[in-house]
Image: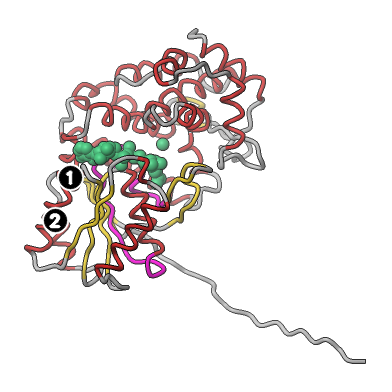
């Protein structure tokens, strides 16, 4: 009888990669960036990707400095705003790169906020199956959060950040002087992630924020540089411990499970940080109700958020940003459809005290009974 022989071959691809990179924080960093590229080129030519606002403030200046140093540099621009973080815009940027004749030897400089970083980083991840890129964050949110960690991607109508890749930048340059031109609402929104970082892992930073809040609000460069550096250390330590967000890195999601739901339900009229601030108020309340987070610590968290001008009352905030009433059930339903939901169940990262998160059997993503969430939401939506 004829036998069907199958043979198996193996492709050995055990990988050892070193994705390490440096983050430079300071003032007036563009000359330094250009010098670094002259000494240690990332490619033979550079393309600055910026949005329509940032290009005028910083993008053009960087292109000019690169060209003056004898480097080949071009720019690609997209319209400012979250609405641009899409596949069609990515496609347009890729078309732009191809028309410029950029090949494998090109490198991208993402100059702007989180939208630019996520979008340009994703373009870099897939163009020629990956070309190097630098992050040059110009918003507080991008400096303390999105520019490091390597998460890149775009939104689709099926979900925010639904399509993307983990792709690390070669270096990050956070020039705190760029923050002086940021609109106040954007700056304050970025402070929500700063408070979040302090609550999840740095009690000393929290105290510093309480003490130097006013200098921070005045955007004192020395204070900002210190804050950005400290925040980056917290995020970097978590990214190092858990690059693919399997457990520990999930503490960064504090305030984000319910925050994302509110942000989405507001049709993204609420800024991300505003939603995260409300998310921390609500999730902190869950942690308090579960007996994890002492009341005085919870009130201290909320007082700092309020001091920075962030929203802390979900009821009134939702009324401002929504023209209809949102029920607790609707918010809960949204958290179930979020892509971060594990096996269809939303998870919560909850604080145990300011500076430390609750872990159960080593896990930081904790399930919470829908009944309790509903109770907390109902209570908060009525403004109590
Ligand atoms: N990759 C990650 O790990 C990660 C983490 C958090 C958030 N994000 C993403 O980041 C995005 C939000 O980032 P964002 O808040 O920086 O938004 P953004 O990039 O849209 O910037 C906000 C606005 O500020 C303007 N702007 C930027 N820098 C400026 C400056 N220095 N002066 C004046 N105006 C300036 C921009 O043109 C824009 O209008 C979201 O898409 C979110 O999903 C990603
Ligand atoms: Zn966030």
Secondary element type, mark 1: strand
**Residue drawn at (52%, 19%) of the image:** 285
Instruction: Tell me the residue that label 1 is attached to.
Output: 26
Q: Label 1 vs label 2: CA separation?
A: 10 Å
Q: Which residues are magenta?
A: 127-152
Instruction: Tell me the residue that label 2 is attached to.
Output: 32
**Looking at the picture, how far across and down is residue 373, in whole percent?**
60, 21
Confirm whether residue 21 shows in the render.
yes
**Residue drawn at (41%, 29%) of the image:** 199
**Residue 132 lies in the magenta stretch:** yes
Specify the quadrant of the image occupied by residue 66. Answer: bottom left
Q: Residues within 10 Å of mark 1 (few under 14, many from 20)?
A: some
**Residue 148 lies in the magenta stretch:** yes
**Residue drawn at (18%, 64%) of the image:** 37
305 vs 346, left or right, is left
**Looking at the picture, how far across and down is residue 143, in whole percent?**
29, 42
């Amino acid at each position: 009888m004829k036998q069907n022989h199958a043979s198996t071959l193996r492709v050995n691809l055990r990988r050892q990669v070193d994705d390490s990179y440096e983050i430079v924080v300071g003032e007036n960093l563009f000359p330094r960036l250009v010098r670094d590229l002259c000494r240690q080129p990332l490619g033979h030519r550079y393309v600055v990707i910026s949005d329509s606002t940032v290009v005028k403030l910083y993008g053009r200046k960087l292109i000019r400095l690169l060209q003056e140093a004898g480097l080949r540099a071009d720019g690609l621009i997209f319209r400012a705003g979250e609405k641009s973080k899409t596949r069609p815009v990515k496609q347009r940027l890729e078309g732009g790169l191809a028309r410029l004749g950029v090949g494998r030897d090109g490198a991208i400089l993402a100059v702007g906020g989180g939208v630019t970083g996520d979008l340009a980083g994703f373009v870099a991840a897939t163009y020629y199956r990956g070309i190097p890129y630098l992050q040059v964050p110009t918003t507080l949110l991008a400096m303390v959060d999105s520019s490091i960690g390597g998460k890149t991607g775009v939104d689709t109508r099926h979900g925010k950040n639904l399509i993307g890749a983990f792709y690390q930048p070669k270096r990050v340059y956070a020039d705190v002087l760029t923050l002086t031109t940021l609109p106040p609402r954007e700056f304050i929104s970025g402070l929500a992630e700063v408070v979040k970082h302090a609550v999840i892992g740095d009690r000393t930073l929290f105290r510093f924020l309480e003490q130097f809040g006013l200098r921070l609000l005045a955007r004192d460069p020395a204070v900002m540089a210190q804050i950005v550096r400290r925040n980056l250390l917290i995020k970097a330590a978590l990214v190092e411990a858990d690059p693919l967000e399997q457990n520990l890195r999930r503490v960064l999601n504090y305030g984000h499970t319910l925050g994302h739901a509110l942000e989405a339900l507001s049709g993204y009229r609420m800024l991300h940080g505003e939603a995260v601030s409300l998310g921390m108020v609500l999730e902190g309340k869950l942690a308090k109700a579960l007996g994890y987070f002492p009341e005085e610590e919870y009130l201290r968290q909320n007082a700092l958020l309020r001091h920075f001008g962030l929203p802390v009352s979900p009821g009134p905030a939702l009324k401002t940003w929504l023209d209809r009433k949102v029920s607790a059930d609707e918010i809960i339903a949204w958290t179930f459809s979020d892509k971060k939901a594990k096996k269809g169940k939303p998870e919560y990262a909850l604080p145990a005290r300011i500076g430390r998160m609750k872990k159960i059997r080593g896990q930081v993503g904790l399930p919470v009974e829908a009944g309790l969430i509903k109770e907390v939401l109902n209570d908060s939506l009525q403004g109590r």
